[in-house]
């Protein structure tokens, strides 16, 4: 029975991967692909579709599964169905063929985030087929544009706010079960996201009167931009602080980190020294304690022998909760002014709050993981450095958790938005059981 179940899971999930639903403003998939994907979902999950009320928001979907108790606040489960483009050389298998090899399913979206979408609806389908009725209303949300600006989740959350609908708990994708999440943490840990850093894209522009390249003056636009980027890389520009959830994360990982664990086990008492130690554990650890900025695009210049009158770079800034978006913008603007640069906000995300890791939502996820996923050493809170649609649902919920119940290694982690994205087949049945546990215990 287990083999038959897994075989069906594989074939159903492969069909979801094979339908291209790329979210990209310039070269995205045609709209009919998303329509076909919705049709496939209801073919694969007919019982939960029949059990739910469905509302569509320009290709993003919201479903309501009526529960038995109207007095309890509802809960929301989320996973998006769009994927990023699959460009670049080096794919072992075509990214939308969903090839099964080496115990894995290969393809774009196998981790981010059709795996979560499939497991969520497969769990609900099996429960609905058995006649199960949830103890409270359960909503499902799946957006078609999470990978761009999150317009679907934004619209749906605003509609829910207008309707006066609030959730006790929201469960979105985000953290996963990671093998050695920090250097030296020997084990397998469920990294349960309790918040995410807000994102700002900034344009830094340097101007001059131009001139011929044969007689260059000092501090031309490209030179000033280069000096600015070098300064930011080599200096402590933003405030550092080890937030409480990260202190808790370090203390939970400490028993698995050998000698270093002796120090980390006292993270709540040694927050200040850890501000200096965390960067030594790698870029990921460093990003957890401070606002960061990565310079990602640049342009300017008119000809090879002309000093540009204007040159620019784009910085992708991820703002810590303790410094916040406005203070982070003020800080980087002050630094940019030293080099005579103009600063423009290109885009800014919604800021999200931090969910209490001692609260009911976190504890339920922790309980579900340990009950359904073999091989997990411990569960720990952490703060996402990337973004998710959950940020929009802070409008209607105080406890938003970001987590997927799949075990991944470092190579799989790097494949998200990269090449050779793949899902271990062995994680599929436990993931469905995790979602069933969650739906039965909320």
Image (tube, rainbow, N blue to C red):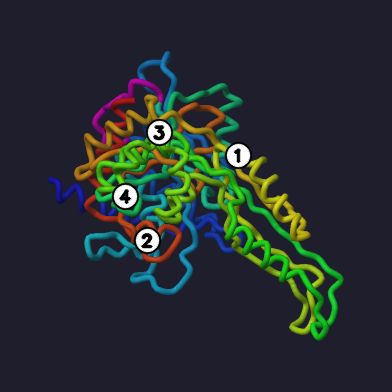
Quadrant in the picture for residue 130: top left
Q: Quote the CA–CA distance across marks 3 and 2.
A: 40 Å
Answer left or right for 226 relative to 442.
right
What segment is highlighted magenta in the picture?
A: 124-137
Q: Quote the CA–CA distance across marks 4 and 2.
A: 15 Å
Please tell me whether mark 3 sits on a helix, a strand or a loop: loop
Label 2 or label 1, whichever comes before in sequence order = 1
Q: CB of mark 4 within 8 Å of CB of mark 3?
A: no
Question: Residue 352 appears at what percent x and percent y?
Answer: 55, 36
Q: Quadrant of the C terminus?
A: top left
Label 3 or label 2, whichever comes before in sequence order = 3
Label 4 or label 2, whichever comes before in sequence order = 4
Please tell me whether mark 2 sits on a helix, a strand or a loop: loop
Q: Quote the CA–CA distance across marks 1 and 3.
A: 24 Å
Which residue is under mark 2?
Answer: 421
Which residue is under mark 1?
Answer: 324
Please tell me whether mark 1 sits on a helix, a strand or a loop: helix
Please tell me the numbered disc located at residue 178: 4
Q: Quadrant of the N terminus?
A: top left
Is 126 magenta? The answer is yes
Which residue is under mark 3?
Answer: 269
């Amino acid at each position: 029975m287990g083999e038959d179940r897994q075989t069906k899971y594989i074939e159903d999930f492969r069909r979801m991967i094979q339908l291209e639903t790329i979210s990209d403003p310039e070269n995205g998939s045609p709209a009919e692909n998303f329509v076909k994907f919705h049709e496939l979902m209801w073919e694969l999950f007919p019982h939960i579709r029949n059990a739910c009320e469905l509302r569509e928001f320009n290709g993003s979907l919201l479903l309501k599964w009526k529960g038995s108790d109207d007095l309890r606040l509802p809960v929301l489960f989320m996973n998006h169905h769009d994927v990023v483009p699959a460009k670049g050389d080096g794919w072992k298998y075509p990214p939308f063929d969903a090839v099964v090899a080496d115990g894995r399913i290969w393809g774009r979206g196998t981790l981010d985030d059709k795996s979560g979408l499939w497991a969520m609806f497969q769990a609900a389908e099996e429960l609905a087929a058995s006649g199960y009725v949830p103890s409270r209303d359960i909503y499902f949300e799946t957006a078609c544009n999470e990978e761009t600006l999150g317009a679907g989740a934004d619209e749906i959350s605003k509609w829910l706010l207008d309707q006066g609908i609030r959730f006790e708990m929201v469960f979105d994708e985000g953290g996963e079960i990671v093998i050695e999440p920090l250097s030296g943490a020997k084990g397998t840990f469920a990294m349960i996201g309790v918040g995410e850093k807000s994102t700002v894209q900034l344009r830094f522009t340097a101007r001059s009167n131009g001139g011929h390249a044969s007689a260059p003056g000092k501090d031309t636009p490209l030179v000033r931009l280069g000096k600015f980027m070098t300064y930011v890389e080599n200096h402590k520009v933003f405030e550092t602080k080890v937030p409480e959830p990260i202190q808790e994360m370090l203390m939970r990982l400490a028993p698995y980190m050998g000698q270093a664990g002796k120090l980390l086990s006292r993270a709540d008492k040694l927050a200040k020294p850890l501000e200096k130690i965390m960067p030594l554990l790698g870029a990921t650890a460093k990003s957890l304690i401070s606002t960061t900025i990565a310079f990602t695009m640049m342009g300017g210049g008119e000809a090879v022998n002309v000093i540009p009158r204007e040159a620019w770079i784009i910085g992708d800034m991820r703002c810590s909760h303790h410094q916040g978006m406005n203070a982070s913008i003020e800080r980087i603007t002050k630094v940019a002014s030293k080099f005579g640069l103009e600063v423009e906000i290109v885009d800014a995300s919604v800021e999200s709050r931090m969910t209490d890791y001692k609260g009911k939502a976190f504890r339920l996820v922790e309980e579900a993981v340990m009950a359904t996923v073999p091989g997990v050493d411990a569960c720990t809170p952490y703060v996402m450095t990337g973004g998710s649609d959950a940020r929009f649902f802070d409008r209607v919920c105080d406890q938003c958790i970001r987590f997927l119940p799949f075990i991944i290694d470092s190579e799989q982690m790097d494949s998200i938005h990269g090449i050779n994205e793949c899902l271990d087949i062995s994680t599929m049945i436990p993931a469905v059981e995790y979602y069933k546990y969650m739906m039965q215990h909320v």
